[in-house]
Image (spheres, rainbow, N blue to C red):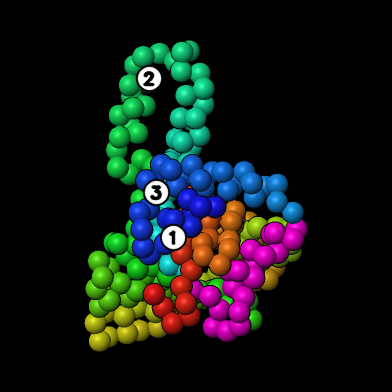
Amino acid sequence: MKILHSAASATGLRPPPVVLLDAILEAQNLGQGEGAAVRSEFFDSLAGGGSPGRQWKLIYTASPSALRGLRGKKNLDKRRKEVPFLQRMVSKVNEALPWTWGLYVDALVTAIQRFDAATFENENGVFAVLGWDGVRFSVKGPFKWPQPEVRAVCAFQPTSACVRVVGWETVFSLEPGPVAFVDTPPTKLPFFKFVHVDDRVAVAIGRSGGAAVWARLDNGGN
């Protein structure tokens, strides 16, 4: 977990995106074999501590193609002698692109999620862009994590949104789905499958197959 903790740290050198993405894949593989005791700790680390819950700052995202690409690269490296020269060169060019292995995003946007186990409320929003907090957008609603000791899927459903532009602010309701939230299977809702959560960092795979890493904040903010 050293690489994940280094990525979430506010000080010191961060691992390159490809190294972090490899650590995410490793955590995903480890998480599949972890027992009930470890998984149950994920939920408390993410949302425990009493209201208003725990806050998490988004620091890194990777697209589904980035995860597929790194898995493919590992397979390619294993059978390098069998792969045509042109295919190897195309792979090298793709690897050199700065966004290929995901991006650290916290210098661009301040995106924070809050999970509260006491009320099962989730809030997710962008609270600053390039350090400027004149424009904010957030959504709020219930979340659920059935059987956290055996499952790692946390689903949520925004029911209200808040937009603030400089001094102007409005809050409005969002249309609920056709089936009540409590009756909707988690995999039919927006969800994260958490592969690792501790007191410093959270790592999850989203419904689309992309990955995200968050650093835990104090309740008061950054």
Q: Which mark is residue 15?
A: 3
- What is the x, y in percent for residue 129? 27, 68
Question: Nearer the N terminus, badge 2 or badge 1?
Answer: 1
Badge 3: residue crowd in 10 Å (few <14, some 14–19, many ≥20):
some
Mark 1 to mark 3 CA distance (whole Å)? 10 Å
Q: Which residues are magenta?
A: 36-55
Residue 206 appears in the figure: no
Q: Secondary structure at mark 3?
A: loop
- What is the x, y in percent for residue 183? 70, 68
Instruction: Report the residue marked by disc 1.
Output: 8
Question: Nearer the N terminus, badge 1 or badge 3?
Answer: 1
Query: Where 217 sits versus 52, above or below?
Result: above
Is 43 magenta? The answer is yes
Residue 166 appears in the figure: yes
Query: Where 13 sits versus 91, above or below?
Result: below
Q: Nearer the viewer, residue 156 or 175?
A: 156
Which amino acid lies under the numbered mark 2 shown in the image of this protein?
Gln
Residue at 46%, 18% in the rendered image: 80
Residue 161 lies left or right of residue 194; in this view the side is: left
Q: Secondary structure at mark 2?
A: helix
Residue 193 lies left or right of residue 127; in this view the side is: right
Instruction: Report the residue marked by disc 2.
Output: 87
